[in-house]
Amino acid sequence: YYLFGFMVLVLAMLLLTCAEIAVVMCYFQLCAEDYHWWWRAFFTGGCSSLYVMLYSVYYAFAKLKMARTVATIMYICYMFLVSTTFFLITGSIGFLATFIFIRAIYAAIKVD
């Protein structure tokens, strides 16, 4: 039972980190008066999947030592699907956190 609690804790830390980094990067972008933040917030959150894909390729060639090329191709294709799903999940978390942040700071502006 300890494994599932640890996994939930790691997932919460991942989601919180993706959200915080996307919000901070969007804040820096808004301070530079660049207001095209929509896609950049999505890509900022999703860039952690690049690490997942690169590490899976390294792991395939350095650690697994597969004998057949078909197994290697299947592994790379499945890890590409996992990495793409990871990109969509973390990118969505980054975008939603940034969207909530933008709404909060623009709601606090008082127009006189």
Image: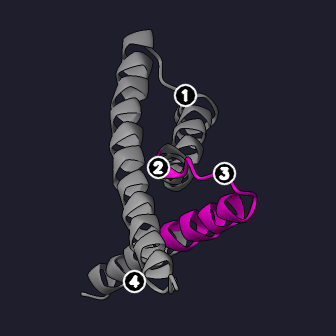
Does dot 3 land on a helix, a strand or a loop? Answer: loop
Residue drawn where x is 48% and y is 44% of the image? 39
Query: On the rendered structure, is 27 left or right of 75?
Result: right
Return the disc, 4 or 1, that comes first in the chain's sequence.
Answer: 4
Q: CA distance from mark 4 to mark 2?
A: 28 Å
Query: Magenta segment, which residues?
Result: 18-38
Taking the view exactly as shown, the residue that stands out farthest to the front is 112
Secondary structure mostly seen in the magenta stretch: helix
Return the disc, 4 or 3, that comes first in the chain's sequence.
Answer: 4
Q: Which residue is denoted by mark 2 in the rendering?
A: 38
Does dot 4 land on a helix, a strand or a loop? Answer: helix
Name above or below for residue 94 compared with residue 7. above
Name above or below for residue 4 compared with residue 63. below
Return the disc, 4 or 2, that comes first in the chain's sequence.
Answer: 4
Name above or below for residue 81 compared with residue 47. above
Residue drawn where x is 42% and y is 52% of the image? 91
4 or 1: mark nearer the eye = 4
Amino acid at pointer 2 = Trp
- Asked which quadrant contains residue 69, the reply is top left
